[in-house]
Image (tube, rainbow, N blue to C red):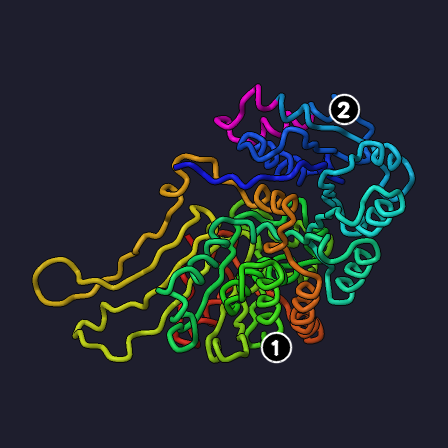
Amino acid sequence: MVSRVIPVDVFDLVIFGGTGDLARRKILPGLYRRYVAGQMPADSRIIGAARADLSEADYRAQVAEAIAEFVPKDRQDKTAIQGFLDRLHYVAIDATGTNGWSALKGLMRDSVVRAFYFSVAPSLFGDIAQRLSEHGIADAWSRIVVEKPFGRDLASAKALNAVLAKHFNETQIYRIDHYLGKETVQNLMAVRFANILFEPLWKAEYIDHVQITVAETVGVDGRGAYYDKSGAMRDMVQNHLMQLLCLIAMEPPYHFDPDAVRDEKLKVIRALKPVPSEDIVRGQYGAGGGDKGYVAHSENPASRTESYIALKVHVSNWRWQGVPFYLRTGKRLRARASEIAITFKQPPHAIFDDAKGWHENVLVIRLQPNEGMNLMVMIKEPGPGGMRLMQVPLDMSFADAITDGEDVPDAYERLIMDVIRGNQTLFMRGDEVEAAWAWTDPIIQGWELRGDKPQTYDPGSSGPEDALMLMHRDGRRWREIR
């Protein structure tokens, strides 16, 4: 199968924090893969910018090591690697001072796309934005990419948006959430809006409930200090799970256009009901399985930060009236899995005697691992002896069929190329971020005022017992994490 490659304009991409972990693990290897795929015009350049005093040769050597470590061996080609390294430049720069900015300005070219990736702590966003503007490095056509966290509450999110808005307009700001770059997440929109089979059923009349799960097997090792100021609600629900919920619940946009899509997502966030305390379960993993437990990694031995959270959420509009959305995410769980499961209601009249064999139709969208989709349907169990029902998966895993051995871009690759193309569809808008925090803040403030403690759960389990009861009391069950 021949893929359709969309042309990309010639660009200068500056990566602030160009020697950092994110740049080494994701950004630079991803750009190399796009270079190999032919999506990097010949005159495009990548400029690393960081505090370290490195020569250009030193920086290229570091990037070569990153490619060797984080790009699959079968995708490493000596000629391609050298061609990619030849595009790299480096500037030692002081984000909060004056050093390096004149040198960076001297590297900038006219008549190419200028993009600036802020792969640094949010506390530096304002300083970098200000200096890009003051030194005339960024112009009205430049784009900036900022990583989460986009604040830690509504007040800080507004302050961050205000700082960026001093120097860039909203059309220039790309708030990146790598979950939205996943192939299957984007296919969720295609499945909904390009197939008459699903969209007429995508409402309360036919859907019983929705489950969104993001489960991790890793703990907070080495990130205890950060995580204690964040927790699962701020780290995962306010952004990743919120975005998945929006894509499931949004109304059809008038066109697949950046602002049209984001307008509909914003409506979903604003329609979210407040969540009562009985619909919230917080957990913190204890010791076991070779792990000393969450508090061993925290600076506070009495920490009440949640490493797990489950919520029952409602969208207050006509399409979703009465349909619960169950969200859960946690660390040190049984398996690594991210999926969305849309469970449909039972038929209004059962004509078969074998009621015990009946199960709901479920559309399962797997984000990781093994991206794909399954539709669970009922069929007759093979063999004589009457009409006995059984559930089977109608496999909609299309990766092999559509890629034909091609190297499918990962989320960061796709999103960075969207920045270069000027396509903001898969990036969060400022008002969307603020609306998400406006819903999240009261939930966090509620358990802080009540002094709630997270329930301890065993590492390698499916989470706290109370999370099971969140479903059981409604006569439902979580899908097994596997």
- As helix, strand or loop, the secondary structure at mark 1 comes to loop
Q: Is residue 395 magenta?
A: no
The kind of secondary structure the magenta stretch mainly shows is helix
- Residue 277, percent across and down? 59, 76
Q: Is residue 153 above or below residue 167?
A: below
Please provide percent x and percent y for residue 241.
56, 61
Q: In the image shown, does 17 or 42 lie closer to the viewer?
A: 42
- What's the residue type where badge 1 is placed? Pro
Whether residue 144 is situated above or below residue 73 in the rendered picture:
below
Disc 2 residue type (three-letter)? Glu
Of marks 2 and 1, the one in the foreground: 2
From the viewer's side, name the closer residue of 445 and 417.
417
- Place residue 96 in its image quadrant: top right
Q: Residue at image x 25%, y 64%?
A: 378
Residue highlighted by disc 1: 274
In the picture, the disc for residue 375 is none
Q: Is residue 242 visible?
A: no
Q: Helix, strand, or loop for circle 2?
A: helix
Q: Position of residue 213 (x, y in %)?
A: 49, 59
- Callout 2: few (<14), some (14-19), or many (20+) C-alpha neighbours within 10 Å? some
* Residue named by callout 2: 56
What are the residue bounds of the magenta stretch? 62-81
| Mark closest to the chain's N terminus, 2 or 1 | 2
Does the image show residue 192? Answer: yes
Residue 278 in the image: x percent, y percent? 56, 77
For image coordinates 77% across by 64% down, the residue present is 158
Whole-number angstrom distance, CA of label 2 to CA of label 1:
53 Å
The answer to whether mark 2 and mark 1 are in CB contact below 8 A is: no
Mark 1 Cα within 10 Å, few/some/many (few <14, many 20+)? few
Is residue 68 magenta-colored? Answer: yes
